[in-house]
Image (cartoon, rainbow, N blue to C red):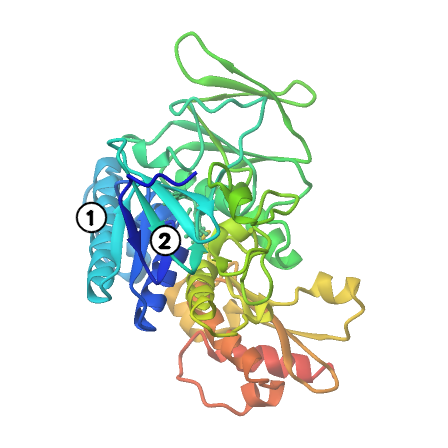
Amino acid sequence: MYNDSMETVRYDAAVIGGGEAGIAAAVKAAELGARVCLIESSSQLGGACVATGTLPSKTFSISAGVFESVKKAKNFGVRIDGPISLDFKEVVGSRNKLMKCDIGVIHSHLRTHKVEWIQGWAVFLAPDRLRVTRTDGTAVEIETPRTIVAAGSHPISLPALPVDGTAVITTDEIVALTECPRRVVIIGAGIIGCEYAFIFRTFGADVTLIEKTAHALLGQDKDVVAAIEKELKRRGAALRFATTVVSCAAKPEGGRIVTIEGGTAFEADLVLTCIGRRPSTERLGLEAAGVALGGRGEIIVDECLETTASGIFAAGDVIGRRMQSSTAILEGAVAAENAMGGSRTIDERFVPGGIYTQPEIGSVGLTEDEAIENEIPHIVGVCGYAALVKACSLQTFNPGFIKMLFDPSSHKLIGAHILGAESAELIHNLVIAMRTGATAEDFIYSIYHHPSLSEGFRDAARDAVSKM
Ligand SMILES: Cc1cc2nc3c(=O)[nH]c(=O)nc-3n(C[C@H](O)[C@H](O)[C@H](O)COP(=O)(O)OP(=O)(O)OC[C@H]3O[C@@H](n4cnc5c(N)ncnc54)[C@H](O)[C@@H]3O)c2cc1C
């Protein structure tokens, strides 16, 4: 109930959550002329992306990539005298520097747009009223005609694998690591599990990757998946797929023994669970606001990202769609624009995927399996990185390929999957190509820098046309 003696502040828009979606929403609403408050309970802005997710994992990937490259320096005629080693403390240091820098950029954005940050936990009292409780126990009430909920998500844990934050962790606790574990068991071979499998293996740890389904990277192109599994094995990771963990026992001297179905056991100094994330919709008072949830606890939104309560919008992981920073940023901005009177929608056919394994993966649109299952006519064209002078000069051609799917009647691009150097960057060309309806001939008759990795688009398109 309302508390008459409590301080009440009026805003044109309130945003719950200071992650990528919330920041994008707050800035957009402010750009459109609103007086905006951004409510974030943590002492740091940026959400999972900055604190535990994208940024920490990507800085680890970059360090792993540099370590790999330096080891190969002699192939390029660069002599490094003396042993090459990895200093985990410096890796962590470089990650912390980047986090600080990113947080600085966020604050500067918010300042420029005069967004007011209220540090505290927000709860709906009514559709147009929130109570924010600060860490010191004091509270403020906010009256606003429009709210954007961007409360994010949290890691799922398994009953057989209780997280203790030291020997058994989720990606939330990875930032606290001060040294690289010797033996790591990773549960879940999805995007995050695979990324960390490559990272820890490159850092020198023994890695065992356990996965419930028969293959890694569910939903990715089958040729990409096969190549990644082969690459993980080549690098010495042990893959245990189509099985589950039955127990995770503590060893008296520290660490864990992880046992899978059939009784095989693995010793681990660190167990990292990467079995997915769940939208964070508890303790928000959503029922008081009339905001309905779906079966996975996600906030239900329409195509304009409005919830079941008029004037309340939602964006980012909390709506349980792609659960990526990239989509969270666009959803946040679109939700704010619509809260301010717009009616914009997001075309989900053109969402790029970027996976920072070694090598990277970039993808957009249909996979070959999806096309087959849904009886969508398609022609596949492939160009191996080994056929590209640039890839050969970088000595990163194996494994690596560009695979493009075209519609055989219109010749338009309908899907693309790239495995290899720079693929998470290259994929953006194909996102725009798909958005604008580019055909195989557009790729064939465009001029590309030589040598470049992008020449592979032309060669994959030629391969497809030769089969039409
Ligand atoms: C290991 C890992 C690697 C990843 N790598 C990538 C990648 O390479 N590329 C990519 O695009 N995505 C990646 N992601 C996903 C990405 O991090 C998330 O999709 C993104 O951070 C979601 O942003 P968000 O704003 O929706 O939520 P969050 O970042 O979770 O932010 C939500 C915020 O809301 C706050 N909050 C919640 N409830 C309240 C409340 N009631 N009051 C006040 N504050 C509240 C929380 O404290 C939190 O800060 C990765 C994720 C992980 C875990």
Q: Is residue 351 left or right of residue 263?
A: left
Residue at position x 55%, y 85% from top?
A: 443
Residue at position x 60%, y 81% from top?
A: 461
Tag 1 near tag 2, CB within 8 Å: no
Residue 18 in sight from this viewpoint: no
Q: Is residue 457 above or below residue 250?
A: below
Quarter of the rendering occupied by the N terminus: top left
Choose between 33 and 195: the one closer to the eye: 33
Which labelled disc corresponds to residue 143? 2
Determine which residue is flagged by label 1. 97
Residue 135 image point, x, y percent = 27, 34
Q: Residue furthest top?
A: 252
Q: CA distance from mark 1 to mark 2?
A: 38 Å
Q: Is residue 416 left or right of residue 379?
A: left
Residue 27 image point, x, y percent = 32, 65
Choose between 203 and 156: the one closer to the eye: 156
Quadrant in the rendering for residue 75:
bottom left
* Mark 2 lies within 8 Å of ligand 1 (Cβ measured): no
Quadrant in the rendering for residue 416:
bottom right
As shown in the figure, which amino acid type bears the numbered disc 2?
Answer: Glu
Residue 337 image point, x, y percent = 43, 70
Mark 1 closeness class: few <14, some 14–19, many ≥20 residues within 10 Å: few
The mark that comes first in sequence, 1 or 2, is 1
Q: Is residue 160 above or below residue 278?
A: above
- Judged by depth in the image, the label closer to the viewer, 1 or 2, is 2
Q: Residue furthest right?
A: 375
